[in-house]
Image: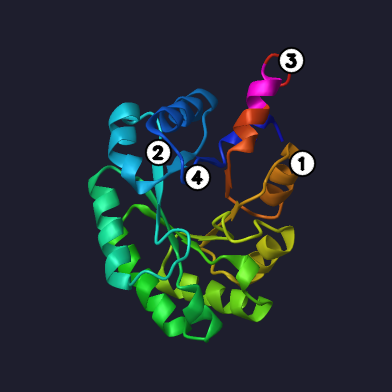
Amino acid sequence: MELKQILQHCDHTLLTQTATWEQIKAICDDGIRYGTASVCIPPSFVKQAKEYVGDQLAICTVIGFPNGYNTTAVKEFETREALKEGADEIDMVINIGWAKEGNFTAIQKEIETLKAACGEKILKVIIETCFLTDEEKVAMCKAVTNAGADFIKTSTGFGGAGAAFEDIELFASHVGPKVKMKAAGGISSLEDAEKFLSLGAERLGTSRIVKIAKNEEAKPGTY
C-alpha cells in the first residue's frame, strides 16, 4: 500500500495536555498537505481549528477524554458544544467502570444518547482495550453495534497500552456490518499501519505516519 493511501486513513492526532494553538495549527497544515482523514484535537481548539481549515479538512475531537467517567449528561453537553463549534467527528470514551461491572446496558444507552446528538456526524467509541478482557471487548462490540455508533476504537493512547492487532481481529469478528474500526495508540511504523488496515481497520489514530511522510517525501518515488 502506498504511503499516500495510508495517510488517507489517518486521524492525525495531537491530544497532549500541553498542546498549544501553534502546534494545533501545524497539524492542521500537515493534515491538509498530506491528505489525512482528519485531525483529532482537544475540544478547546475545535472552533479555532474549524475556522482555520474551513472545508479543507475534517475536525475530530474527543469527549469524556481520557478516563470516560464523566456523567452521560456532561458527555452529551460536550458533544453538542463540540458540534456547534464545528467538529465533524466525535471520539467518545466509554465509562470503563461500567464495563468492568458488566453494565453494558448503561454503556449502550450512553452511546445512543451521544449518537442522537451527533446525528449524521461520525461517532467513534473508544473502549480502551488495555483495561478489558476479551469477553468484555466482545460485549462492547455488541453494545457499539446496537447503539448505532459509526466506529469502535481501541484506545485513547493514555491508558498504558495502545492498539493491538489481535483486538482489531476480535472486533472484526464481533461488530455489526455497519460498524467500522479505528486502531489508535502506539502506531509508529508503516508496516504496523498497513497491517492494521489489512485486518480491516478503516481509521488509524496516530501522529507518526505524517512524520514518516515528512521524512520520506524528499526520497524519489516514495511519496
Mark positioned earlier in the residue sequence (2 or 1):
2
Mark positioned earlier in the residue sequence (2 or 3):
2
Label 2 Cα crowd, 10 Å radius (few <14 / some 14-19 / many 20+): many
Q: Are marks 3 and 1 in contact (CB under 8 Å)?
A: no
Q: Are marks 2 and 1 in contact (CB under 8 Å)?
A: no
Label 1 Cα crowd, 10 Å radius (few <14 / some 14-19 / many 20+): few
Indicate whether 74 appears above or below 16.
Answer: below
Badge 4 element: loop
> Does residue 81 appear in this view?
yes
Q: Main secondary structure of the magenta part?
A: helix
Magenta region = 213-217
- For label 2, the residue is 58
Specify whether residue 165 is painted magenta: no
Q: What amino acid type is highlighted by mark number 1?
A: Glu
Q: Nearer the viewer, residue 116 or 47?
A: 47
- Give how far apart the Cα atoms at labels 3 and 4 are: 31 Å
Q: What amino acid type is highlighted by mark number 4?
A: Thr
- Give how far apart the Cα atoms at labels 3 and 1 are: 18 Å
Label 4 Cα crowd, 10 Å radius (few <14 / some 14-19 / many 20+): few
Q: What amino acid type is highlighted by mark number 3?
A: Lys
- Give how far apart the Cα atoms at labels 2 and 3 are: 28 Å
Badge 2 element: loop
- Give how far apart the Cα atoms at labels 2 and 1 are: 25 Å
Q: Position of residue 102 (x, y in %)?
A: 52, 86
- For label 3, the residue is 219
Label ID, residue 16: 4
Label ID, residue 191: 1
Indicate whether 17 appears above or below 76.
Answer: above
* Outermost residue, right side: 191
